[in-house]
Image (cartoon, rainbow, N blue to C red):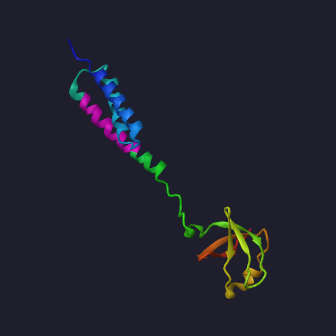
Amino acid sequence: MTFDWHWLYFVFGVLFILIEIFTLTFYFLPIGIAAIVTGIFALFIQNVYIHVAIFTIAGIILLFLISKWKKSRFLKPVGSQFVAGLVGQQGVIIEGFMSSQSPGKVKIFSDIWEIHWDPHQENKIMNLKVGDLVKVITVEGNKVTVDKVKT
C-alpha cells in the first residue's frame, strides 16, 4: 500500500489558509497555496524529493509576490493627517478680505480656515474674491497662508 501524499498536502494547504483567515498576517497564505500546488503535482509525481523542491520553490515565490502585493496594497502613504498635510492642498475662498483683523476665510476639504495676515502679501490677500481657488503655502497655528491658483 502506498501513501497518497497529495491528500496530506491538500489538508495542510487548507489548514494554513484557514489559519491565515483568522490571523490576517499574509504569512500562512503562501505556505497554504504552496502546499495545494504541491498536492496537485503530487497527483502525478511520486518522488518525495521533488515534492519538497516544488513546495520550497512555490513557497518562496509566493511569499515574495504576496509580501510585495501586501506592501503596495496596505502600506500606501496616505499623507499627513496633521495640519502639515494641508500644505499644497487647494481650497476655495468663502469670505473675502475685509481688514487686517479679518483677512478672509478659505474652505479646505470640509474645514474652514482663517487666512494668515501678512503685511508683505497685502495686495495678494486683498485681491482674493469669494469663489477663488487657492493653494495652501504654509500653516501657521490655526491660520493658513494661501496663494491664488492660476487658471
Q: Which image quarter holds the C terminus?
A: bottom right
Q: Quadrant of the N terminus?
A: top left
Determine the residue positioned at 74% across, 76% down: 104
Quarter residue 59 falls in = top left
- Magenta-drawn stretch contains 64: yes
Residue 42, position as x, y percentages in the image: 29, 23
**Residue shown at 63%/66% (left/top)?**
89
Tally of numbered tags: 0
Q: Is residue 40 above or below residue 64?
A: above
Does residue 4 lie above or below 144 as drawn?
above
What secondary structure predominates along the stretch shown in magenta? helix
> Would you identify the image quadrant in which residue 125 lies?
bottom right
Instruction: State the residue in front, 35 or 16.
Output: 16
Task: Give left or right: position of 86 versus 6.
Answer: right
Q: Residue furthest top?
A: 1
Examine the rendered structure and indicate whether residue 66 appears above or below residue 111: above
Q: Look at the image and give the residue range highlighted in magenta.
A: 51-66
How far from the left and from the top, in percent, is residue 54? 29, 31
Quarter of the figure with residue 5 = top left
Q: Residue at x 39, y 32 (%)?
A: 18
Q: Residue at x 54, y 63 (%)?
A: 81
Asked whether 121 falls inside the magenta stretch, the response is: no
